[in-house]
Amino acid sequence: MSELSSIVEFSINLKDVEAPSPLPAGEYTGAIRAAEVKMSQRDTRYGAISFFIGPEQYPADFTDGNPDGMTLIYRRVSLEDNPQARYGCKRFVEAIGAPLAKSVNVDEWVGMEASLEVVHEEWEGVTRAAIARVRAA
């Protein structure tokens, strides 16, 4: 196995680099590539759902996207056992077409698709694409 060099060469000087444009706001179809149960800073369980959006869905004038597609992580699925969280989880499970039951295995969500409403939000001073809503595809 060869060792990686400590010198990394880019195609342009980093001092000339500007923030890329985020994926334009709109509706996209996303396929779940990963789903994990995580703990929030408030010590509550939620699902971190990685949706993949293929490059064929990019608008023609969007040139800053990864040519292999992009992944957006949706972190708004509460997995707590209370009325509001259970209802929100039910709506998400229905949107991706997974079976409803007393227990859910988030690993089984991988490969399922949904319609994603993508919006722009600001994070650490940079505008980025984020999933605002998940609907049935």
Image (cartoon, rainbow, N blue to C red):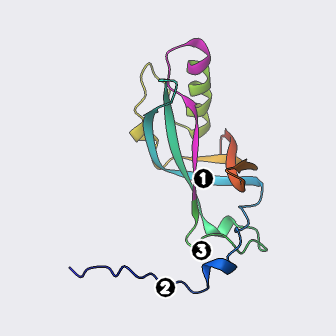
Helix, strand or loop at label 2? It is loop
Q: Name the residue under label 2.
A: 9
Binning the other alpha carbons within 10 Å of mark 3 as few (below 14), some (14 to 19) or many (20 upward) gives few
In the image, residue 2 above or below residue 98? below
At 61% across and 85% down in the image, what residue appears? 12
Q: What residue type is labelled 2?
A: Glu
Q: In this view, does 107 lie to the left or right of 132?
A: left
Identified at 74% across, 52% down, the residue is 27
Whichever of labels 2 and 3 marks the residue nearer the N terminus, that label is: 2
The amino acid type found where label 3 is placed reads Pro
Give, as a single range, the part of the protein colored magenta.
71-85
Q: Position of residue 96 (x, y in %)?
A: 57, 40
Q: Indicate whether residue 80 is drawn in magenta.
A: yes
Q: Nearer the viewer, mark 3 or mark 1?
A: 3
Question: For residue 67, which numbered disc appears in the image?
Answer: 3
**Residue 103 in the figure: left or right of residue 86:** left
Question: Left or right of 25: which side holds 82?
Answer: left
Picture layout, residue 76 above or below residue 122: above
The amino acid pointed to by label 1 is Gly
Query: x%, y% of residue 77?
Result: 56, 32
> Residue shown at 40%/32% (left/top)?
105
* Residue bearing the label numbered 1: 30
Q: How far apart are marks 3 and 1 (CA)?
A: 16 Å
Q: Real-space Cα distance between discs 2 and 3?
A: 20 Å
- Label 1 Cα crowd, 10 Å radius (few <14 / some 14-19 / many 20+): many
Which one is in front, 99 or 109? 109
Q: Is the C-beta separation of discs 3 and 1 under 8 Å?
A: no
The foreground one among 93 and 85 is 85
Numbered tag placed on residue 20 in the rendering: none
Sequence-wise, the earlier of marks 3 and 1 is 1
